[in-house]
Amino acid sequence: MVIDPEVPPDDAQLLRESRQVLAKMRQGWAPAPKRAMSSKHYRMMAVIGPVVFVGGLAAVGLLGRGIGILFVLLGLPMIIALFVLADLPGDEQEEYEREVYEQLRWYEGRYVLTDDLDESSARLLARAQRAIAAVTESRVNAEGLLDDVRNAVMLPAQEWEIARLLAKLSALRAKHRETVSKGVTPEVEAVAEPLARALDSSEEAVLARVEAVERYASNVADAERAYLAHHQIEELRGRVHQYEELVAETGADGFAVPELERLAQDADRLEQALRRSVHSAHEAFRHRDPS
């Protein structure tokens, strides 16, 4: 499920956990009208009420004291059993499903189930999600070398916009195919073909969005490689004296350690490459703010 990032986090989490209720809703299920008193409380009142009433009559002398006491004693086990049964999950599950149902109805149109996408749309969304994950899970993003705050806002908004458009495209494309599958006359075909091209052009526009995210992810991947290489070089530089000491102790002076001397130059080049890569990553998605 892809959810509009403007949905409050707690509600979004509830929606993500609602697939079972959503499946029931799509089969026509709806919760029963809410009762003023839950079934648990109704059962408790049905037993406790008569017991208290009879006990009260006995107390004021309107009923035989022995009969009243006997009635109360017989009713006590039932009351205890009801309090034990009150902890059973039946009513809680019913209330939870009602809450989920209301949230799903309230946020209709602000979430997309990936199962609702046709094959082509599902592939496009998966490409976008892989690219977004590559950015958000990168070390350069975690280390704050990218605009991580902006990424946290922009990338979910892009994912939602892509999913929303693909859901509309899938639904309309399914209806279009259903209509034309029944066979069309030349007159209908003259109308259907331009509409089919409109669907294709819409998919191409969404594809352009996806490719923009992938280009951003590609630039971030370049920065990631430079970042990792830079740190590896720094680790090696930190151990240069150990290598030099070993070479001196073993008498391997002919080695002359030219490779070690190049470490500083390599580190400088990698640091410059890292800066260029990060700058390119910033620029790659600069104009792709959600519209």
Image (tube, helix red, strand yellow):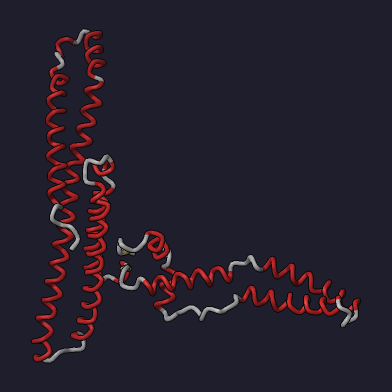
Give x and y (percent) for residue 178: 23, 83
Give x and y (percent) for residue 181: 20, 85
Which corner quadrant of the image does residue 74 belong to? Answer: bottom right
Examine the rendered structure and indicate whether residue 231 appears above or below residue 32: above
Examine the rendered structure and indicate whether residue 204 appears above or below residue 143: below
Front one among 59 and 27: 59
State the residue at coordinates (69%, 76%).
45
State the residue at coordinates (14%, 13%).
256
Which corner quadrant of the image does residue 169 belong to? Answer: bottom left
The answer to whether 209 appears left or right of 104 in the picture is left
Quarter of the picture containing the C terminus is bottom left
Front one among 207 and 182: 207
Front one among 164 and 290: 290
Give x and y (percent) for residue 153: 26, 55
State the residue at coordinates (15%, 46%).
281
Which corner quadrant of the image does residue 237 belong to? Answer: top left
Give x and y (percent) for residue 65: 90, 77
The answer to whether 97 appears left or right of 283 in the picture is right
State the residue at coordinates (18%, 41%).
223
Q: How many marks?
A: 0
Quarter of the picture containing the N terminus is bottom left
